[in-house]
């Protein structure tokens, strides 16, 4: 079995954590099933770094046009390499950009495409995998009916596993045609960690009483190096931007640690954050449904508990480096 | 301007998720079905184009007869005509290929599909339609302005947004931001009466397009009890997160 991963980089050309996770995943699949593993990256600054995660060959494209994401250009390049290298399996992350091109790629390479994958594939006559569905309320076992396969791995479902091997990095250059989309500008809401990239997410609900109190959420997120998020009512009220709304109709969160403050835990909210590994709730109401979904809880007033938590975390951080 | 809005018929967000037939099928009993929220934001944006730019709106679903109640709701809030491809789709590819076949026979300027359905969360249909029809595609679209053939759109990216200029024809992966929650329409009596008179075209299909087979479903294990920490002992929480949960 020949596996290709698309290893995404950030604006400085460094591999994203998602890229290292899918490399770890694909390397394990490859070694269990006797295959080879190739990575494709665009303008990576250190393409050889993937050898730490079991990638045998990294094809790093050097094209100015690939500095900014474009769905047509990216999907053309990835499918070209998939075909020319005679690959069987393409592994993608669950980043926004990978999700954007996954459906397009599946048609271009006539593959069976499965998203939100949380297991390694089981090989038989056909490949099967397990995925999250119904917004984390269930798992689905899916069998792929085509010979070519694309798996988009759910973030944080496999983790990083180092596996240093000898590998080669080669450079390539694509012939790139013009795209139908012209990017005019990019507006970043902040330079902080995004919900998609964060290991820790601190989220506030209506219990915070108003946008003027959000420094509590922001300060806690800052000290933890996490991202800020909010419940649906908070974004509907305009206290926080939509991009921070997590839940079934907002963003899914699969961080290592999710801290919910003043959020009661409506079923739609819980569904969206369910795949986070550890959940903490701070709420005045001991009957709040979030206490049934959380691992740790504090019954108390956010305006007292959060400042205390920030102080104690400062002490913890200074003694634990 | 001719608009096609793809409508997924999904369980309401408050639904209990259960399975039947040896855990191989979603149990629809007692479940309230709605227009997929990501599709509804797109449909509402389409209705604005109808009111301001004289657009016409068709809605389409690939499904069996039970999805017609959801298509009628789309007609009641302002779509002009509904199409149901009479087929029980097996996966996202099956939906996308049927819709693409229909688009190739009936040209549209703008095609809107939710970025993801809230039931199976495949998130693949709009991209697949784009590849099958060779129509340009903007995913996670949160702002859309059209004048003549020119399009100014914004898409959500991690940590911000990207402003794009392009032209019709175009496929949009819709979500909140195209319109706000408060802009969503509730069908009124007049709309419901009018919807009964609007055309709902049924097209039979026995084309078996699919790439995956859903074997069965499992429900997550019930969660253990929450560990409660006293409000004046937050250092204990830090200790548990550090030593027990290894999350700090």
Image (tube, rainbow, N blue to C red):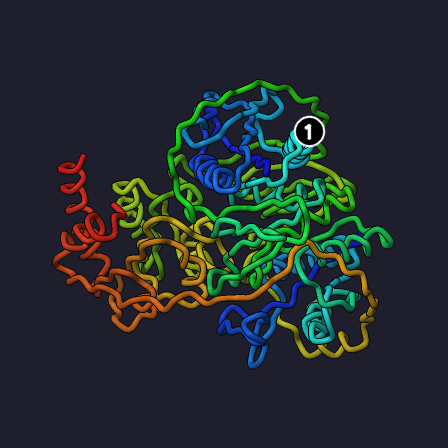
Please give the name of the residue rendered at 30% of the width and 49% of the height, measured from the top-left corner. Answer: A217
Residue B127 in the image, given as x and y percentages of width and height: 67, 47
Please give the name of the residue rendered at 53% of the width and 33% of the height, measured from the top-left corner. Answer: A37
Furthest residue toward bottom? B30
Q: Which residue is mark 1?
A: A84
Report the front residue among A127 and A15.
A127
Kindly identify which chain the residue marked by label 1 belongs to. Answer: A
In this image, B136 relative to A9: left or right? right
Report the front residue among B69 and A255.
A255
Residue A118 in the image, given as x and y percentages of width and height: 47, 52
Residue A318 position by quadrant: top left
Furthest residue toward right? B105
User: Which structural element holds mark 1?
Assistant: helix
Vertical placement of residue A295 versus A95, above or below: below
Please give the name of the residue rendered at 19% of the width and 53% of the height, measured from the top-left corner. Answer: B240
Q: Residues within 10 Å of mark 1 (few under 14, many from 20)?
A: few
Task: Tell how many labels.
Answer: 1
Residue A188 in the image, given as x and y percentages of width and height: 47, 36
Report the front residue among B57 and A257.
A257
In this image, B105 relative to A110: left or right? right
Residue A237 appears in the figure: no
Vertical placement of residue B225 versus A211, above or below: below
Please give the name of the residue rendered at 42% of the width and 36% of the height, measured from the top-left corner. Answer: A17
């Amino acid at each position: 079995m020949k596996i290709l991963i698309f290893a995404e980089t950030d604006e400085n050309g460094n591999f994203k954590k998602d890229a290292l996770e899918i490399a770890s995943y694909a390397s394990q699949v490859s070694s269990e099933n006797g295959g080879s593993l190739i990575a494709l990256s665009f303008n990576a600054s250190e393409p050889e770094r993937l050898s730490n995660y079991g990638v045998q060959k990294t094809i790093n494209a050097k094209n100015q046009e690939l500095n900014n994401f474009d769905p047509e250009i990216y999907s053309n390049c990835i499918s070209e390499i998939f075909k020319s290298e005679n690959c069987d399996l393409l592994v993608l992350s669950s980043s926004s950009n990978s999700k954007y091109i996954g459906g397009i790629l599946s048609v271009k390479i006539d593959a069976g495409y499965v998203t939100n994958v949380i297991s390694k594939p089981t090989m038989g006559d056909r490949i099967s995998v397990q995925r999250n569905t119904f917004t984390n309320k269930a798992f689905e076992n899916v069998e792929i009916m085509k010979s070519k396969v694309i798996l988009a791995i759910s973030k944080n479902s496999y983790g990083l596993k180092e596996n240093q091997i000898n590998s080669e990095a080669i450079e390539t250059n694509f012939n790139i045609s013009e795209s139908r989309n012209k990017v005019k500008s990019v507006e970043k809401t902040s330079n902080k960690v995004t919900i998609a990239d964060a290991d820790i997410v601190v989220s506030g609900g209506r219990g915070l009483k108003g946008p003027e109190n959000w420094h509590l959420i922001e300060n806690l997120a800052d000290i933890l190096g996490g991202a800020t998020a909010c419940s649906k009512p908070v974004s509907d009220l305009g206290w926080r931007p939509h991009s921070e709304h997590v839940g079934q109709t907002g963003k899914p969160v699969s961080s290592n640690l999710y801290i919910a403050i003043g959020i009661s835990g409506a079923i739609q909210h819980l569904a969206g954050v369910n795949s986070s590994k550890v959940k903490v709730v701070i709420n005045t109401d001991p009957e709040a449904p979030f206490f049934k979904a959380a691992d740790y809880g504090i019954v108390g007033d956010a305006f007292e508990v959060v400042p205390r938590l920030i102080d104690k975390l400062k002490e913890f951080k200074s003694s634990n480096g | 301007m001719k608009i096609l809005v793809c409508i997924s018929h999904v369980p309401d967000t408050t639904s209990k998720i259960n399975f039947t037939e040896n855990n191989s099928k979603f149990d629809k009993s007692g479940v309230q079905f709605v227009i997929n929220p990501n599709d509804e934001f797109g449909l509402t944006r389409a209705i604005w184009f109808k009111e301001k730019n004289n657009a016409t709106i068709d809605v389409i679903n690939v499904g069996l007869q039970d999805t017609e109640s959801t298509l009628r709701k789309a007609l009641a809030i302002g779509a002009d005509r509904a199409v149901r491809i009479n087929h029980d789709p097996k996966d996202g590819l099956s939906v996308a290929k049927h819709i693409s076949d229909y688009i190739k026979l009936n040209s549209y300027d703008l095609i809107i599909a939710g970025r993801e359905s809230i039931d199976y969360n495949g998130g693949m249909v709009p991209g697949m339609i784009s590849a099958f029809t060779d129509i340009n595609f903007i995913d996670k679209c949160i702002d859309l302005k059209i004048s003549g053939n020119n399009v100014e759109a914004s898409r959500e990216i991690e940590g911000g947004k990207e402003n794009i200029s392009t032209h019709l024809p175009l496929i949009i992966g819709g979500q909140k931001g195209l319109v706000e929650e408060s802009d969503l329409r509730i069908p009124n009596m007049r709309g419901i009466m009018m919807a009964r008179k609007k055309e709902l075209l049924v097209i039979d299909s026995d084309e078996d397009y699919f790439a995956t087979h859903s074997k069965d479903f499992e429900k997550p294990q019930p969660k253990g009890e929450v560990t409660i920490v006293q409000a004046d002992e937050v250092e204990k929480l830090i200790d548990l997160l550090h030593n027990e949960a290894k999350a700090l």
